[in-house]
Image: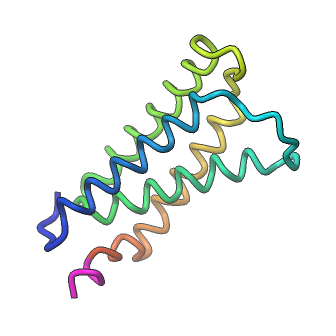
């Protein structure tokens, strides 16, 4: 992890984001009606935010490893949805949305959004 004044606190918040995504992925699906693409947008944006957030905490050379870890997390959650829950199902389109979010987050981090913690440190 990078040396940041609030690094530990930021890491805790990052892990809470992961817990939120895991809980949101495995809790029973609501009965509310959604727009056709809202679920996919939620997947994409969740993993994009996760990627940019953690890219800000770790050195640039670790970013591909973060991308792989988040891809594996998304894949595992999809498998668990299909095997552990009765109200959710495994969906490869969700995994595709997660992956697109990771890829966009990676690009945005490389374009400068990974600098966000340094702005907080100032």
Asked whether the viewer can see residue 60, the reply is no
Left or right? Give the position of 23 relative to 1. Answer: right
Residue depicted at x 17% and y 59%: 8
14 inside magenta stretch: no
Across and down, in percent, residue 83 comes to 59, 11
Classify residue 34 as left or right of residue 10.
Answer: right
Instruction: Determine which quarter of the picture holds residue 95.
Output: top right
Which corner quadrant of the image does residue 96 belong to?
A: top right
Q: Is residue 121 rendered magenta in the image?
A: yes
The outermost residue toward the bottom is: 122
1 horizontally vs 47: left or right: left
The boundaries of the magenta stretch are 118-122
Q: Main secondary structure of the magenta part?
A: helix
Work out whether 53 lies above or below 94.
Answer: below
Residue at the image point whose x is 34% and y is 60% from the top: 55
Asked whether residue 115 is in view, the answer is yes
Question: Horizontal and vertical percent for residue 43?
Answer: 63, 46
Q: Against 79, is 27 above or below?
A: below
Question: Where does the C terminus fall, quadrant-wise?
Answer: bottom left
In this picture, residue 40 sits left or right of residue 26: right
Percent coordinates x, y for residue 61 in the rendering: 24, 56
Count of marks overlaid on the render: 0
Place of residue 113 in the rendered image (x, y in percent of width and height, measured from the top left): 42, 74
């Amino acid at each position: 992890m990078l040396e940041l004044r609030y690094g530990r606190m930021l890491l805790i918040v990052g892990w809470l984001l992961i817990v939120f995504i895991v809980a949101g992925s495995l809790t029973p699906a609501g009965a509310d009606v959604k727009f056709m693409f809202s679920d996919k947008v939620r997947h994409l944006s969740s993993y994009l935010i996760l990627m940019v957030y953690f890219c800000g905490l770790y050195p640039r050379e670790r970013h591909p490893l973060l991308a792989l870890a988040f891809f594996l997390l998304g894949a595992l959650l999809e498998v668990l949805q299909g095997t552990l829950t009765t109200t959710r199902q495994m969906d490869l389109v969700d995994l595709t949305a997660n992956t697109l979010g990771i890829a966009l987050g990676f690009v945005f981090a490389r374009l400068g959004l990974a600098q966000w913690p340094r702005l907080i440190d100032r």
